[in-house]
Amino acid sequence: MKDAFVSCDAGKVPFSAYPQHPGYPQARESGLGRRRGRPHDRSMKKGSWGDDPALLMENSDHGVIRVMRLQEMGVSSTTTYRRCGPSGPWTRLLPGIVLLFNAPPSREQQIAAAMLYGGESALITGGEACRIHGLRNVPGTGDEVHLLVPHERKLHNYGFVVVERTQRMPRTVTRDGRPLAEITRATLDVSRRQTEVRPVRALMSEVVQRRYSSFERLSHELAHGSQRGSAVPRLVLTELASGQESIAEIDARRVWERSGLPEPMWNKKLYDEAGRLVAKPDAWFDEVGLAWEIDSLSFHLQVVDGFDRTLARNGRYAAAGVLVLQTLPSRLRTEPDKVAAELRAAHAAAAARARPNVRIAS
């Protein structure tokens, strides 16, 4: 692969030999290339910036810097323009924003460029904000960085930056040094840009299930925010309103519809005859006393003591005399007819037994 170059007064230095690039461990450990707090205070005599190329990195954010900042450091606009040319060592990412390398920008460098382009009043929202918040089921958005800016700002989309002017700037949450829209707004901002139901269902279900937000907060934000693109998230919120807490349970409803059985109660707490909590089954067929649990392997692997908790729950079901059917979430999608048949068989087996003395909380 052809090497990229960084230039200084000594001539062009191979990119692979330049340790100050933010992709290198030395740069990450030393903090070079990431501005922390106020810009670097070291002065630079006009015309002498090439004597100390590392100083440019120290005044950048992951190697991304404003043209105006370069001018303050003695780099003329003509020099910047020339160095961003087809054979130059720098790259123009956005209007007034330069990458101090001629390699393709990393994701962190794209985010840095977007924030410099947006200015101090901008917040990251949408898919990128959701990922930084820690969500896993984020719909693909390509290299898009979605920014929110106050409505009076005259800023427009450019390249990979999507600018949304709003009169309802959300609360700011800082993660990894970046200002983000709080998670409810970020979730709906990415959801409103989707045309398919399933990725939105996966994202919103995760947000609710992991208690990052709630059905009520999502509904309030959707009702008071932009109505453009609201049809898909509105449909998913209607599904969540039925009491289902995860995408697996939404898939379970579709399998139940194939079964022809009476509708169960969804996510209701079950108590034994002494008033002790037995469990909160994903679905409960009260007439025959059948519990249906959608048990994910990832829950057992990711949640501390997840497997032990499932065993304890099954022990309480057995002690209360409750028949329980356990189903993997993946089978709801890959084998819906087989699962529906298993559900009918389990229902028939429960109906053939005396109903256990248990009750659903009123």
Image (cartoon, rainbow, N blue to C red):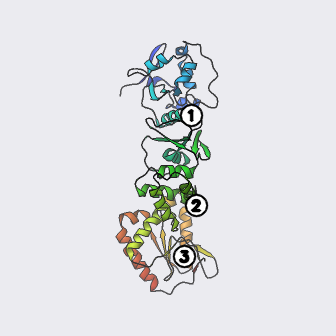
Q: How far from the left and from the top, in percent, is residue 78?
A: 47, 16
User: In 3D space, how far apart are the residues under numbered discs 1 and 3 (Cα atoms)?
Assistant: 57 Å
Residue placed farthest to the front in the image?
152
Q: Which residue is mark 1?
A: 119
Q: How far from the left and from the top, in percent, is residue 278?
A: 58, 74
Placement of 62 over or under 294, stated as above or below: above
- Badge 2: residue crowd in 10 Å (few <14, some 14–19, many ≥20): few
Q: Amino acid at mark 1?
A: Gly
**Can you tell which mark lies on residue 317?**
3
Camera-nearest residue between 56 and 27: 56
Q: Nearer the viewer, mark 1 or mark 3?
A: 1
Residue drawn at 56 percent across, 54 percent down? 224
Residue drawn at 52 percent across, 26 percent down? 20
Q: Is residue 335 visible?
A: yes
**Can you tell which mark lies on residue 93?**
none
Question: In what quadrant of the picture does the N terminus appear?
Answer: top left
Judged from the image, the secondary structure of the residue bearing numbered disc 2 is helix
Judged from the image, the secondary structure of the residue bearing numbered disc 1 is loop
Q: Amino acid at mark 2?
A: Glu
